[in-house]
Amino acid sequence: MLEKTRGIFLHAIPYSDNSIIARIYTERFGQQAYLVRGVRSKKSAAPINLFQPLFLLDLEVYHKNRTGIQSLKNARLSVPFNQLPFDIGKSAQAIFLAEILMKCLREEEGNPELFSFLFHAACLLDLADEGQNNFLISVLFRLTRFLGVAPQQPPREPYRFFDLISASFKQQEPVHHSFMDVECSAKFAELFEHDLSGLAKLSFNNRIRRELLDSLLEYYKIHLDLSGDFKSLAVLKEVLS
């Protein structure tokens, strides 16, 4: 059946000389794999330049209630980006976030609240000026709520460490190695105080940003049972350093 939905592009692999299989997180159907034919044709209804990480798309798709590859009829930009494709820092964050989302968003059903969060986050990344290098950390932190693994709020009593395994702040150093040190824990607590509109208010330098990113990725692996390496991580760290 031909259906309409919005989507966030995540990843593509070549299928033939003129076709791709595109991974897209859709508003109505969750993450789906779509066969897109003729992407390099001048008359294509879904040209290849639309399929870039976090690009926001309006889609017409042939949807069947089954697993496997679906078919895409046409696509167009839902919100054209002005900066993201041309800013190396923003595009590196988009590529990495798309990789994370492809690993985490496995459900083949719609989640309008999560889709709205990611849609507006992508728009913010395109528009962000001050604090743009804090975007990825802030999004990964807030995404935990939608994935059902949100960390506990900082307590009123004194704390020194954030325990990645218990997802809580502790006064005493944990007996295992999966925790943030005192400085990193204090910076992590700032994320509870500001939403995505407050990126410029986060006082992260490059070292803290790298440490927070590494800790959040370990947190994701612990609580979401993610395995394997993140292919775009090295490039991201180089760009944001």
Image (cartoon, rainbow, N blue to C red):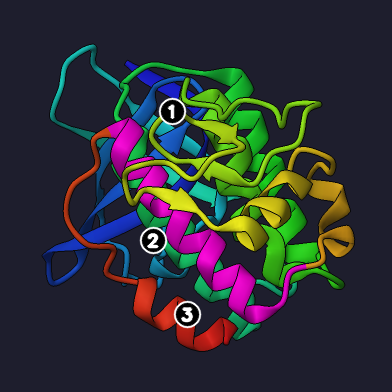
- Residue at 37% in and 31% down: 61
Q: Nearer the viewer, mark 2 or mark 1?
A: 1
Under circle 1, the secondary element is loop
User: In which quadrant is the N terminus drawn?
Assistant: top left
Foreground pick, 64 / 233: 233
Coordinates of residue 103 in the picture (x, y in percent): 29, 43
- Residue carrying label 3: 237
Task: Give the number of the disc on residue 166.
Answer: 1
Residue 75 magenta-highlighted: no
Coordinates of residue 156 in the picture (x, y in percent): 81, 26
Coordinates of residue 57 in the picture (x, y in percent): 55, 46
Instruction: Answer above or below: position of 178 versus 67.
Output: below
- Asked if marks 2 and 1 touch (Cβ < 8 Å), the reply is no
User: In which quadrant is the C terminus drawn?
Assistant: bottom right
Coordinates of residue 104 in the picture (x, y in percent): 35, 37
Foreground pick, 61 / 24: 24
Dot 3 or dot 1: first in sequence order is: 1
Give the class, few, some or many, for how many residues have Cα within 10 Å of label 2's Cα (few <14, many ≥20).
some
- Residue carrying label 2: 44
Q: Amino acid at mark 2?
A: Ser
Badge count: 3
Residue 219 magenta-highlighted: yes
Q: Magenta stretch?
A: 204-224
